[in-house]
Amino acid sequence: MHRHFKLFKPYGYLSQFVLHDNTKKRLLGDFYDFPDGTMSIGRLDKASEGLLLLTTDGKVSYHICSQKVEKEYYAQVDGIIKNEEIQTLKTGVVIKTEDGSNYTTLPCKVHKLETTPELPPRAKKIRDDRHGPTSWISIILKEGKYRQVRKMTAAVGFPTLRLVRVRIDNIHIENMQPGEVLELPNTFS
């Protein structure tokens, strides 16, 4: 029987279990004694936080990584983002992919968050308010290129300072704390 988990990936951890070099890095196995064959469904880069799903079922992983499933992110951006930039993000922006080619992002849902979301503090301080104002947006995608949200916000002139994935499909991060792991019911798949 397959098993499924959700994890609040903290800042500074890699979304993998094994490194193929001798560097000392913080990995997912530090949080829980996951069963053999557990894989992360998609990834969050080292500087990103939030909801990461894990499973022993490759079919579930494939489905969630497809362009059929929504992933929602809260992004704290440098400056006060305006409606014009939000509209540009919604319709698609050109970003560079890992291989250096240009890619136009698919249309997505974006809106400004009127209040700062209630999230656990990040392990590494972001910056002081004296460096200028920031704002928060919600971005809902059905795709996931490498560092896509960060590249999108930078493309409209608002670099991402903090990025937290809060939802995948109908699974929410809720009140989880960084490093917390919860096993999901098998009906999840």
Image (cartoon, rainbow, N blue to C red):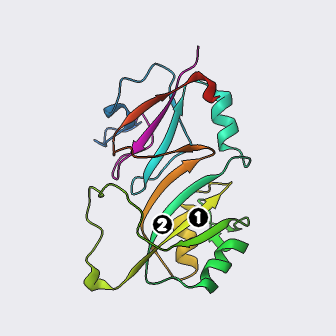
**In the rendering, at what x and y percent does residue 46 appear?**
40, 52
Mark on residue 94? none
Q: Earlier in the sequence, mark 2 or mark 1?
A: 2
Q: Which amino acid type corresponds to the residue marked 1 in the rendered image?
A: Ile
Check the image and name the residue furthest to the top: 1
Helix, strand or loop at label 2? It is: strand
Residues at marks 2 and 1, CA–CA distance in whole angstroms: 8 Å
| Left or right: 114 as drawn, with respect to 97 | left
**In the rendering, at what x and y percent does residue 97 appear?**
62, 63
| Left or right: 82 as drawn, with respect to 105 | left
Residue bearing the label numbered 1: 139
Residue 103 position (above or below residue 133): above
Residue that appears at 73% across and 64% down? 106
State the predominant SS element of the stretch in magenta: loop
Residue 158 position (above or below residue 171): below
Mark on residue 75? 2
Crowdedness near tag 2: few (<14), some (14–19) or many (≥20) residues, C-alpha within 10 Å: many
Front residue of 44 and 114 = 114
Residue 22 visible: yes
**In the rendering, at what x and y percent does residue 179 appear?**
33, 40
Residue that appears at 65% across and 43% down? 65
Front residue of 76 and 115 = 115
Q: Which amino acid type corresponds to the residue marked 2 in the rendered image?
A: Ala
Range of magenta residues: 1-18
